[in-house]
Image (spheres, helix red, strand yellow):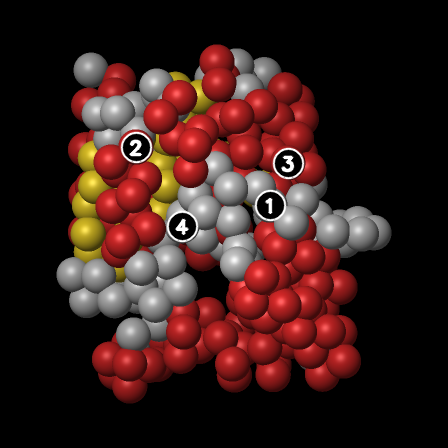
Amino acid sequence: MAYEDVGSGPSVVLLHGYPFNRSMWREQVEELRQNHRVIVPDLRGHGESAVTPGPATMESMALDVASLLETLNISRATIGGLSMGGYVALAFYRLFPLRVRSLLLADTRAQADTEEGKQNREQQAEKALREGMERIADALLPKLLTTETVAERPDIVRRVREMIGETEPEGAASALRGMAVRKDQTSFLSRIIAPTLIVVGSEDALTPVADSELMHREIGGSRLQIMEGAGHVSNLERPEEFNRALVKFVKDVEA
């Protein structure tokens, strides 16, 4: 499992979304490393981490993260994830609740895929394997980013397109099939007792604000931060606001 490990202090683990890699957290790493130890892995099949046969389930990715933390002698950490990374963070908490100091759930949701959603993932998996990741980028970009970002922020568009293009089609297909079989976590949310920050872009088309409001209602004492004008990748579209919310949250948890 490829990863970066920088800074010193309380540990924060950030898990990227599909079909990205650890570089999506660059601005957050730079901010957090001043007072924290920050670990950003490439989840299996993404970035520099190996593709494995069969669906990459959220539980298997969570176990990869647990193994990495054992290797690094980290017993407890803030575990954060965006989109697919949020699914993995929830799976990690379910498997290892005592190892989670606090949770960050960004642009993600607790519900399982609908039947239509599962079919869409399988079609996307087959398309990735058949046509390559450039075509996946073409289809995903308008859903990931706001129309304003697409029109006015070529730097972000280029960065997202490059991350998608660097993902192996086999890794993307494996993750899609893993996400399709994940269980509904809604009934589990009320059992989360770790301090939790929920972040969502106001324009998120893939996991809308209502999905975050549901998690906020069910997770006792959770905070909900809505990033105005951001889409599904709120940490890239609104990095300063995202960082402010995250830094304040981890400081409050550690106080």
Q: Residue at x 60, y 45 (%)?
A: 182
Residue 51 falls left or right of residue 186: right
Marker disc for residue 236: none
Residue type of the residue flagged with mark 3? Glu
Residue 102 image position (x, y, % from top left): 36, 25
Q: Residue at x 41, y 48 (%)?
A: 109
- Which of discs 2 and 4 lies nearer the camera? The answer is 2
- Mark 1 or mark 4, which has the lower sequence index? 4
Residue type of the residue flagged with mark 4? Thr
Residue 237 falls left or right of residue 75: left
Q: Are marks 3 and 1 in contact (CB under 8 Å)?
A: no
For label 3, the residue is 59
- Which of discs 3 and 1 lies nearer the camera? The answer is 1
- Which of discs 2 and 3 lies nearer the camera? The answer is 2
> In the image, is residue 116 above or below residue 88?
below
Q: Residue at x 68, y 67 (%)?
A: 122
- Mark 3 or mark 4, which has the lower sequence index? 3
For label 4, the residue is 108
Distance of label 2 from label 3 (alpha carbons): 22 Å
Distance of label 2 from label 4 (alpha carbons): 14 Å
Q: Farthest residue to the front: give it.
A: 115
Residue 149 image position (x, y, % from top left): 28, 76
Marker disc for residue 182: 1
Secondary structure of the residue carrying numbered label 3: helix
- Mark 3 or mark 1, which has the lower sequence index? 3
Marker disc for residue 218: 2
